[in-house]
Image: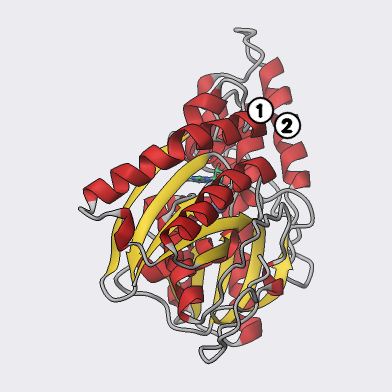
Amino acid sequence: MRILGIETSCDETGVALYDSEHGLLGHELYSQVDLHGEYGGVVPELASRDHVRKLLPLINVLLDDCQLQKSDIDGVAFTNGPGLVGALMVGACAGRALAFSLGVPAIGVHHMEGHLLAPMLEENPPQFPFIALLVSGGHTQLVRVDAIGQYALLGESLDDAAGEAFDKAAKMLDLDYPGGPQIARYALKGVAGRFTFPRPMVDRPGLDFSFSGLKTFTLNTVADQAQKNTEQSGLPDEQTCADIAHAFQEAVVDTLVIKCRRALEQEGLSRLVIAGGVSANQRLRERLESALHKINSSVFYARHEFCTDNGAMIAYAGCQRLLANQVEDLGVKVKARWPLNELSSLSYNDNKSGENNG
Ligand code: KG4
Ligand code: ZN
């Protein structure tokens, strides 16, 4: 069974074809980073319009690359939340219409479930149960995953998401959007130990996060150091900026590592999945690998291009839901907000349609 996956929840147009027997057949991605770069963040209306321009041509490129026709598609999966409503509508309307015209099922996919399952596309996928750390631009959550659709939220950010904190810190240092990869690159040049940033909420019990205090600390440090710069650029000198980026990244990574260990210990599990844009962070991967090795646990993540938004994760998640007959009715429904634990688990003898209530 071949499933077309469509991702348009934010600023990437992603499409992919996943075969339930042969795995991923191909994927294409068009990033809107250049479009939004000059505004320093995603402009929702521009995002929607660009998805309209890019989506159908990208599906054609994908089919050509896979040497397949539209008639070879057995189901169309699309992200229908959470995300920017206008952007979601583009993928959901196109996906629903395409499925209708081909006479195949349409499957609405939860964007974060897509992220969470992305490591399943790799050679050594994790077995259930595991803990998932979902770290993207909009989410920072620790979830216990017992099976697809069986999600228990263990903790989450009370304010900014980890990716959002990276993006805001980058802005303070006048780095380009999106800030996560820029901070990571800059941090490589930073000197360890020159600045020590707070590790928010690690002294308190529980698995929640908070990154807003760290953001204020970063802002104050940048302002303080900028005053000392004789060049009067409004910023600290180049090396100091790199040192701040380094200290900031260490603080976020340390906080995430501490909470992941705590979640594994609390739940008595030994497998951790990290997913979402921030899981592309090399320092986070290294630190988790060494911390988890010490407690006989392992960390799983997707290849770099499937950590950030992509169509492959949507095609994979959609395929799993279709195999359990969880398909959409003819309506197009998208959700800006959608808690992960509202998803139903997979029941393979369930033949009713429309139960995915996307
Ligand atoms: O999952 P994603 O592509 O989109 C959302 O669903 O939000 O995540 C995007 C976020 C952005 O905040 C971006 O700065 C962050 O992931 N990010 C990173 C890295 N690559 C992307 N953060 C830290 N280090 C990275 N290497
Ligand atoms: Zn995402």
Q: Is residue 256 visible?
A: yes
Nearer the observer, 221 or 309: 309
Residue 279 pos. (x, y %): 49, 56
Task: Name the residue: 57% across, 49% down.
Answer: 93
User: Which element is circle 1 on?
Assistant: helix
The colour scheme used here is: secondary structure
Give x and y (percent) for residue 158.
79, 57
Above or below 191: residue 234: above
Please, which residue is most extreme toward the left here? 67
In this rendering, the answer to whether 57 lies above or below 46 is below
Q: To which residue does mark 2 refer?
A: 219
323 vs 141: above or below: below
The residue furthest bottom is: 349
How many residues crowd around disc 2 within 10 Å: few (fewer than 14), some, or many (20 or more)? Answer: some
Q: Decide which of 286, 221 is in the foreground and name it.
A: 286
Given the image, on which type of amino acid does mark 1 rest? Met
Please give the label number shown on residue 226.
none
Disc 2 + disc 1, Cβ < 8 Å:
yes
- The answer to whether residue 278 shows anywhere in this view is no
Give the quarter of the figure containing the C terminus: bottom right
Q: Residues within 10 Å of mark 1 (few under 14, many from 20)?
A: some
As drawn, the label of residue 172 is 1
Instruction: Measure how far apart labels 2 and 1 are at the Cα level.
Output: 7 Å
